[in-house]
Amino acid sequence: MTITEIEVFLLKKPLASSMHISRGGFQVRQHALVKVHTDSGITGLGEGIGNAPLIKTLIDSHLGPETVGMDPMNIEHLRDLFFHQPVYFERKGSVVCAASAIEMACWDIKGKALGIPCYELMGGLYRKQIPAYASDVYWEKDIQNMADNARRIQDLGFDAIKVHVGWESPEKDTERIEAIRKGIGENVRLMIDLNAGYDLHEARRAAKLWSPFDLYWLEEPLRPDQVDALADLRQAIDIPIAAGENEFFSGGFHQMFRQRALDVAMPDLGRAGGIQETRNICAVALAAGIPVSPHNFSSGVLLAATAHLMAATPNTTLLEMDTSGNAVYDDLILDGVQFKDGMFEVNDTPGLGVEIPESIIEKHAVA
């Protein structure tokens, strides 16, 4: 089997609700979906996470033509082509994100060719139902709106909810966290995501102020390049630190583990180097005693790929789910999103169990 063509669909969906984080907001959600074609007629879908238009340009102009003619079943060979053969190593950034999308699509092809779901390629089924949390409470001026949204999510069956704050000072955002905790009660796990919006001093103040609210983790409080400062913060506070959505490859995570900078690792399959590289990261995390909760905030293709990896990987915990309705989500997953009582159920369709209907291309694709 050989790869004959790589299509990239740039999808854009206007927001139906506000998504305001510590470093500002945005008006649309964009997805870079990759469809790999083969001479056998089997196709596979993947997704690159980051700058979607740049990912499309990189694949159309460079990575796609290089990949045509290769065997999608030989995933390690493809990884070597992308990450190790170039004279100048691309160890971070959009090139890695673009390559991650192609690699992900090859897993989908391999599963379909063999007639098995992708989790069977990753060691077999460890669990069919994966505990999940909702990532869909964003900073608003109206504190009561945030608390009401958290309760809406709780009513969907989630017992773990992530809130994005940090637009204002730790002191002012304390009111928001207090109102949300009061609204959802003590039995719901509450995570706070700062989206790299604070400096070390602000993050220390925040942790001290927010400690009474029994936070499950504090996510990405500092800029991703400030690993030493993150390690200092972790030693100074009693709230677990989660980070890693902006890190690449197992080597990058190994450095974070060595510096004792985090409690929960958050690699993104469509960003960190693909499915196999995320499996490598999980192995390094297991040796370091660090649980892995993959970053998963994009379309249904990334959701499906992340769920398959977590279904086969024991040291992963909590699948991130987007309940905002702002992403192209259920329409890409065969049989739709299966979620009940705080658990996501991975499907057993060969491959990743995803497709991109023509109706979605017509509705959301950018020419």
Image (cartoon, helix red, strand yellow):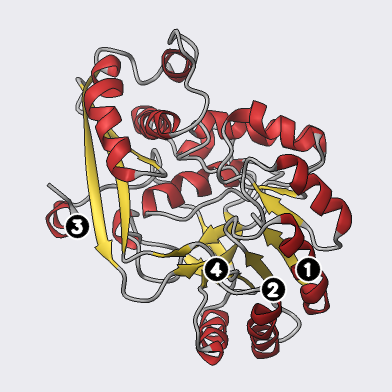
Amino acid on which the number 4 mark rests in the picture = Ala
| Residue 35 in the image: above or below residue 295 | above
Task: Write the residue at 76% across / 83% down.
Answer: 186
- Determine whether the residue tagged by mark 4 lies in a helix, strand or loop: strand
Q: Badge 1: how crowded within 10 Å, few (<14), some, or many (20+)?
A: some
Quick check: 181 above or below 81? below
* Snapshot quadrant of residue 63: top left
| Residue drawn at (63%, 83%) of the image | 176
Q: Position of residue 161 (x, y in %)?
A: 61, 72
Gap in Å between the C-alphas at discs 3 and 2? 38 Å
Tell me the residue that label 4 is attached to.
134
Where is residue 64 shown, x and y percent of the image?
A: 26, 23
Residue type marked 1:
Arg
- The kind of secondary structure element at disc 1 is helix
Q: Residues within 10 Å of mark 3 (few under 14, many from 20)?
A: some
Which residue was labeled with disc 3?
Answer: 364
CB under 8 Å between discs 2 and 1: yes
Tell me the kind of residue under disc 3: His
Q: Is residue 347 left or right of residue 193?
A: left
Of the numbered discs 2 and 1, the one sitting upstream in the chain is: 2
Q: In x, y percent, where is residue 353?
A: 37, 46
Which label lies toward us, 3 or 1?
A: 1
Q: Residue shown at 16%/50% (left/top)?
A: 366
Callout 2: SS:
helix
- Disc 2 marks which amino acid? Pro
Whole-number angstrom distance, CA of label 2 to CA of label 4: 23 Å
Q: Name which of mark 2 and mark 4 comes first in the sequence.
A: 4
Q: Which residue is mark 1?
A: 205
